[in-house]
Image (cartoon, grey):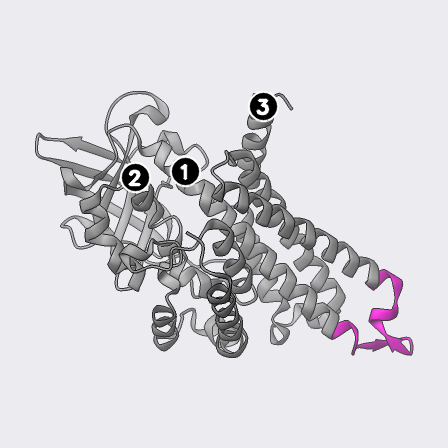
Amino acid sequence: MALDPETFDALIDTVRRFVAERLRPLEAAVEEADAIPADVVQDMREMGLFGLSIDEAYGGLGLTMLEEAKVAIELGRTTPAFRSTFGTNVGIGSQGLVMAGNAEQKAAWLPRIASGEIITSFALTEPDVGSDSGAVKTRATFDGQSYRLNGTKRYITNADKADLFTVMARTSDDPGARGVSAFLVPRDLAGVSIGHPEKKMGQKGAKVADVVFDDVVVPAENRLGAEGEGFKIAMRVLDRGRLHISAVCVGVAERLIADCVAYATTRTQFGKPIAEHQLIQGMLADSKTEALVARAMVLETAAAKDAGKDVVMESAAAKYFASEMVGRVADRAVQIFGGAGYIADYGIERLYRDVRLFRIYEGTSQIQQIIIARETIKRGG
């Protein structure tokens, strides 16, 4: 259920001020330390950011997809690592439980996820399995009372601090996605170990690492849905996650455009601000137009999802366009700033590196193209 307009406006205003006054001044420090300050994480808990998408009955804010997208746009106006701190609780780390969990599972986990007491993570990708997510090799073998889980997951966001993993594992020899099931796996089970966080190109402060399951005994009641439903659950989770990421891309693009305008109207070349040169104006115009298109796609698709419509194609199209768009905007921003855009002090080169990941996770651009084409053909055009 949507919040009343006054309450939602107050939420947006609070998030906007938090981003501008609290988070943006810390961007360089987060990049240097590769960590989010603990007091900032606590502020996020107190604001309810860990429970944006979780029903109010479990202590969350229960935002609609449209409301969540609007909040995500505001959160996109700062270093993406800040949003990633609670992003798995809002999206891929919790939504399998929200969509497919039974009453007991939801009561046991969702209140603590919404409060930020528990950090969640989504474990699908493996060393040999990425885009072909129906080919997972991690195995869950049922012994009559529980499952024994064995395998390795790779590039798992927030693995270093996660308390609960939603794990996709093969439970039968049925080919492809039909043999994949989903499990809730607490970090403290014997046999769960976390690898050293990877060194990444960008998004410093948001960690990814391997997660290894060595003969982990998972109670049968921790399975999400029926055996063989894991892939379907994962795809439903990713549909929502793609819209959220699309909205973040819009926010980053709008931040970059605002930074470009501020710089171009004060930087002088050939006797006038560079904003008065037509070639600079052309880059600003292209960036603004593309950002407006992406914003419209995201908000329209989010509203359609809230209305119960099938938005598999539209979510993929929004993610494809928005993630590619923000890459182009970031590239133009470096060009508009010139030498300053290549220097760390201005933050443009940092965002240029940060946004590159958006074209990869939640499904690469090429996977989105496949989905878009498949759904277009299925719909007859």
Q: Amino acid at mark 2?
A: Ala
Q: Which residues are magenta?
A: 263-280
The residue tagged 1 is 236
**Classed neighbour count for the residue bearing mark 3: other residues with Cα under 10 Å, few (<14), some (14–19), many (≥20):** few
Helix, strand or loop at label 2? It is: helix
Q: Nearer the viewer, residue 52 or 329?
A: 52
Residue 124 on image: x %, y %: 35, 41
Residue 132 on image: x %, y %: 43, 32
Q: Amino acid at mark 3?
A: Arg
Residue 261 on image: x %, y %: 74, 70
Horizontally, residue 233 falls left or right of residue 376, namely: left
The residue tagged 3 is 379
| Residue drawn at 45 percent across, 51 percent down | 64
Horizontally, residue 295 falls left or right of residue 286, namely: left
Helix, strand or loop at label 1? It is: helix
Q: Nearer the viewer, residue 321 or 205?
A: 321
The residue tagged 2 is 100
Q: Nearer the viewer, residue 118 or 61?
A: 61
Earlier in the chain: of badge 1 and badge 3, it is 1
**Quarter occupied by residue 222:** top left
**Classed neighbour count for the residue bearing mark 1: other residues with Cα under 10 Å, few (<14), some (14–19), many (≥20):** some
Residue 218 on image: x %, y %: 15, 42
Earlier in the chain: of badge 2 and badge 1, it is 2
Helix, strand or loop at label 3? It is: helix
Q: Quadrant of the C terminus?
A: top right
Horizontally, residue 296 falls left or right of residue 285, namely: left
Q: Amino acid at mark 1?
A: Arg
Q: Disc 3 versus disc 2: distance between alpha carbons?
A: 27 Å
